[in-house]
Image (cartoon, rainbow, N blue to C red):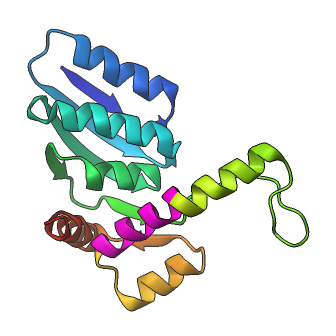
Amino acid sequence: MTLTLYDQDFDSELLTKVTEAVNSDSERITMYICSDGGWVCVCQVLLNIINGNKERFKLIGFESLSSAGFEFFVKAECEKELLPYTLGMIHQPTRTMSLNNTLKPVGEGDKASYERVKKYTIPEDEIFIKRLGLKPKELREYKKGNDVYFQYDRFLEVAENYKTNLK
């Protein structure tokens, strides 16, 4: 089975497509993916599905993999191929919560979100970024909150850094 996911957001639609593919009789699932990103929580669920079935999947990244799309491609443990001229982009994840003028969370839900982000999400982001082996300029731009772009060769390099730094 082949899934072609051009300009695909990481959303419930993508999750449904991948779940249907996994539940099909197909022994091998090839996913062509070009994505500007989407929900990180969907990315994490998809990684769980694909890494749990890694012998069945092959990912082929093309054109652009940004934000959650970049993270997904790099963290997937299945067979992967990056087509020439594919660009990558990372940036700090966007988190939504209401803060007062002293940057403290406003409501109870926002307080819980804030504590969860501090305890779990921020350290996880820092580990991911460290494993990529960013150059000093790339790391400075990332920490400033800017988008960091990778041409094809550099994309391959940071993806390999991530894989190597897992050990």
Residue lying at 28% horizontally and 56% vertically, measured from the top left: 74
x, y percent for residue 112: 69, 49
Identify which residue, 106 or 92, lies in the foreground. 106
The secondary structure that dominates the magenta segment is helix
In the shown orientation, is residue 126 left or right of residue 84? right
In the shown orientation, is residue 68 left or right of residue 101? left
In the shown orientation, is residue 2 left or right of residue 139? left
Residue 4 figure quarter: top left
In the rendered image, is residue 46 in sight?
yes
- Image quarter (top left, top right, bottom left or bottom right) of the C terminus: bottom left
- Above or below, 9 against 97 in this view is above
- Image quarter (top left, top right, bottom left or bottom right) of the N terminus: top left
Q: Which residues are magenta?
A: 120-132
Residue lying at 21% horizontally and 24% vertically, measured from the top left: 2
Does residue 61 show up magenta in the picture? no
x, y percent for residue 66: 44, 56
- Above or below, 67 against 147 in this view is above
